[in-house]
């Protein structure tokens, strides 16, 4: 069995820092349709995903995200016929270069954000979600923690069920119909197992007094000076990026013709702040990796 990856430096930050970072990232990234900012968003997300999961992240980008980006770029001209540069006509409808490039830009942006959300999963464990939202809304924190845990848990359980069925000689070695019956049996076992586990979890929570007034929860998180400095840095970079958003320096016109404004000093400064915000987790993990290797060599 492959060993799980070692937790990076950014994952060890306080949950408030991690939540503030991804909130700032999502807010700024949805406004970054400028070609330079799109490249920063996608490349930084791919870099961080590679640092977290290695070749698995590259397979995700090539097998899922890249086709999704191409499909978005091809579908948009079929429904959006705006634009002055007509490439060709399809069923008397103009296919314009502007519509194609706008679809490509939105596809790249969507792929970058999805990559960032895939990176967020290992950083937001269920205990961090409960810590952040437990006092404000216990029901919301419980729902979020269950949702974050649900898909990996079902995937692991389905693997155990499939392995058990293969060990019993029910691996579905025949044709498609036989494999479909085996899949239906495995799915039925998985659902029964999940329902029984849900009942056991509910009884355990009730026995531990979940939802009662005055109930406290245990956590090991401490907000340190480094967390405060990092939170201030995230806030400063977010504010600098927002100046480019609200001043219009990041605006790019796709219709009727593509118009990219010249790079003003405000755009350069805000784009640099946005790039620094994007590269913050990889740099923190890289610094932590160097410190870990240095301490391992000294020991």
Image (spheres, helix red, strand yellow):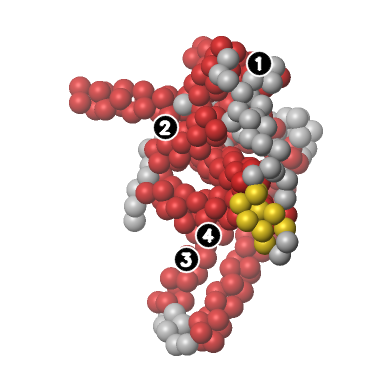
Q: Is residue 137 left or right of residue 299?
A: right
Q: CA distance from mark 1 to mark 2?
A: 31 Å
Dot 1 or dot 3, earlier in sequence: 3
Residue 151, above or below 54: below
Kindly identify the residue that appears in the image at 26 percent across and 23 percent down: 295
Q: Position of residue 188 (x, y in %)?
A: 61, 74
Which labelled disc corresponds to residue 160?
A: 3
Query: Which residue is depicted at the point 47% across and 66% down?
Result: 160
Tell me the mark number nearer the camera, choosing from 1 and 2. 1
- Disc 1 element: helix
Q: Which residue is mark 2?
A: 8
* Badge 3: residue crowd in 10 Å (few <14, some 14–19, many ≥20): some
User: CB atoms at circles 1 and 2 under 8 Å apart?
Assistant: no
Mark 1–mark 3 Cα distance, whole angstroms, equals 51 Å
**Residue under label 1:** 243
Tell me if I can see residue 29 in this picture: no
Residue 240 visible, this angle: yes
Q: CA distance from mark 3 to mark 4?
A: 9 Å
């Amino acid at each position: 069995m492959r060993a799980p990856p070692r937790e990076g430096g950014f994952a060890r930050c306080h949950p408030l820092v991690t939540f503030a970072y991804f909130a700032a990232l999502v807010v700024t990234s949805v406004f970054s349709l400028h070609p330079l900012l799109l490249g920063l968003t996608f490349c930084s997300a791919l870099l961080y995903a590679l640092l977290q999961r290695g070749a698995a992240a590259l397979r995700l980008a090539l097998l899922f995200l890249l086709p999704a980006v191409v499909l978005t770029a091809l579908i948009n001209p079929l429904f959006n016929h705006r634009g002055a540069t007509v490439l060709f006509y399809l069923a008397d409808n103009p296919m314009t270069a502007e519509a194609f490039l706008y679809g490509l830009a939105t596809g790249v942006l969507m792929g970058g954000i999805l990559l960032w959300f895939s990176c967020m999963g290992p950083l937001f464990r269920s205990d961090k979600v409960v810590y952040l939202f437990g006092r404000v809304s216990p029901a919301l924190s419980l729902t979020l923690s269950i949702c974050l845990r649900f898909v990996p848990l079902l995937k692991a359980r389905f693997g155990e069920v499939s392995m058990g069925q293969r060990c019993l000689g029910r691996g579905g070695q025949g044709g498609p119909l036989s494999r479909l019956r085996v899949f239906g049996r495995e799915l039925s076992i998985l659902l029964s197992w999940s329902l029984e586990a849900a009942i056991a979890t509910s009884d355990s929570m009730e026995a531990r007094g979940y939802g009662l007034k005055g109930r406290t929860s245990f956590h090991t998180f401490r907000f340190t000076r480094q967390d405060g400095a990092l939170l201030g840095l995230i806030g400063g970079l977010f504010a600098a990026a927002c100046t480019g958003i609200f001043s219009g320096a990041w605006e790019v016109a796709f219709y009727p013709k593509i118009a990219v404004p010249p790079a003003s000093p405000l755009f350069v400064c805000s784009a640099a702040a946005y790039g620094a915000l994007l590269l913050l987790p990889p740099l923190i993990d890289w610094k932590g990796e160097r410190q870990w290797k240095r301490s391992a060599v000294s020991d």
